[in-house]
Amino acid sequence: MSRASTREISDGSLMEQLQRELESKAEKLADMERQTEFQRAQLSVLAGVSEVLGRTTHVETILGEVLARYLDVALFSRGVAYLLDGDNLRLAAARGFPETPEMQKRVEGFFGRESLLQEAIARAVPVSVPSEYVAQSDSDSILEEMGVQLVIVSPLVSRGERVGVLVLGSDLPKQRQTAVAFAHLAQGQVAQAIALSRTIEELSASEVRFRSIADHAAEGLIVTSHGGRIEYMNTAALQMFHCQPWEAQGQLISLLIPKVGTVAEGGEVVGIRMDGSRFPIQVSPSAFVLPGGMRQTTYVLLDITARRKYEIKLRAEAHHDPLTGLINRRRFEELVDAVLAQAADDPGTRFALLFIDLDNFKSVNDRYGHARGDLVLKGVAQVFTDRLRGTDVAARLDGDEFAILCPEGAYAEANTLARDLLQRIPLVQPDDESDAPFGCSIGLILYPDHGRSRHQLMARADRAMYQAKRGGRGRAVMFGVELLGDNSVFEVE
């Protein structure tokens, strides 16, 4: 063989080798391009899913958006998604077909071989089939019209449950392997979109239920972010603080409840309404962490204004006579004990007690009735209110019996007060024309002259009062006057 022939053979082998290397590099470049296409498709679909989920949770809309993304970047020109509805499949979304009523009807039955679709649903991986296999006798021409030459049927699985089937049509039958890989990617993204959609729908439904329950609750409810800014107030809370939702949204809760940071479970603090008025509330805070690490705090609020008023009323009823408004015997005894405790630390303390019993009050009730009698008792209480000093305290002990504590009184002050009451109380009559012999008898004692205990002092004041009655009524008697022989007995002529 000539050298020229040998050279030609060598050159031919070299060319073949170079051709193989070029083909190998071209294949690698094609693989890289396919990988890039995969990544671009995946990123596009992920972005599409994220964007559409921000607008809607409607599954059909999301499926349509995902299909449109794949048709933009992948090998497919047509796409249809079916969802299981009981035992049947229904069309959920279709892309790449003319949007006409006739075509819509044809698409609904386009892949109508139920056995094929059910078989695909039962499988775990996408299945590729030639277009002529899936064509129906009454609609097989649609494949030719739309140029579909390769069909990929992929089951859709969400949360471990088979929920439908994704069917993708390609115009490039030679790219079957690549198309299957893309379909596998689409299968996962669509299933994820369905799962996310259902999760959002469930959360939305849960939030609707929560808001419905919260807005019908009698208690106020405020939800704040980790920074203490208000994210939600139910109807009761809005009414409680006299504000609208947009006024409170994003505001610091401390503007409404200044000491909210120091309150414990069931603690009572002051709330501030939007108009600046203050009211007592009971607060029960509860902090929790949401999925993803976001922290929130829920405050359950109870407006205790009515309860406070009721408690004040109960305390008043416990310490006061409901008819006259004067303190009752129990409260009077507590005040006497308090003055005696103070006197134990101050040897120079002197005070007086006056016991007053109305004369002939029974005849007023018998003649004019108990309603008029009640008016007389109120009138006597008013006499005390008008006459007594700020430090003096009057009480209704029982029926028509009254008592007065003069913490800063000695004999002269008590004597003057008793004389004034003997003059004023008879002026309280059931009506202007009454001629009932009405008045009072008064017993006086001084501390420490007549005793050092409450029981002893009150018992001796009571004895002095009855001594005044026995002496003819309408008079005042100092305890022990008969024994002392002084001028402590006086009466009004």
Image: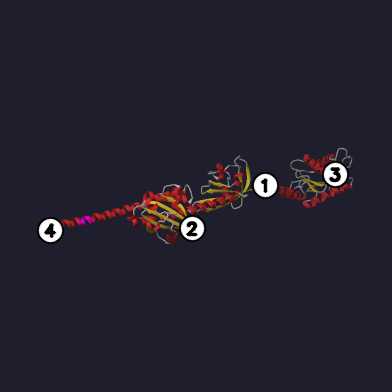
Q: Which mark is residue 440?
A: 3
Q: CA distance from mark 1 to mark 2?
A: 60 Å
The residue identified by callout 1 is 306
- Mark 4 or 3, which is nearer the eye? 4
Q: Are marks 2 and 4 in contact (CB under 8 Å)?
A: no
Disc 1 on helix, strand or loop?
helix
Out of 383 and 193, give the one closest to the viewer. 193
- Mark 1 or 3, which is nearer the eye? 1
Q: Is residue 107 visible?
A: yes
**Span colored in magenta:** 16-20
Would you identify the image quadrant in which residue 116 lies? bottom left
Would you identify the image quadrant in which residue 15 lies? bottom left
- The amino acid at mark 1 is Ala
- N-terminal-most mark, 2 or 3: 2
Q: CA distance from mark 4 to mark 3?
A: 154 Å
**Colour approach in the figure:** secondary structure
Q: CA distance from mark 1 to mark 3?
A: 41 Å
Q: CA distance from mark 2 to mark 4?
A: 72 Å
Q: Residue furthest left?
A: 2
Disc 4 on helix, strand or loop?
helix
Provide residue 191's location: percent of width, then percent of height.
Answer: 44, 55
- N-terminal-most mark, 1 or 3: 1
Disc 3 on helix, strand or loop?
strand
The residue identified by callout 2 is 88
Q: Which mark is residue 6?
A: 4
Residue neighbourhood size for the residue with mark 2, other residues' Cα within 10 Å, grouped as few (<14), some (14–19), many (≥20)? few
Provide residue 385's location: percent of width, then percent of height.
Answer: 77, 41
Q: CA distance from mark 2 to mark 3?
A: 99 Å
Q: CA distance from mark 1 to mark 4?
A: 114 Å
- The amino acid at mark 3 is Cys
- N-terminal-most mark, 4 or 3: 4
- The amino acid at mark 4 is Thr
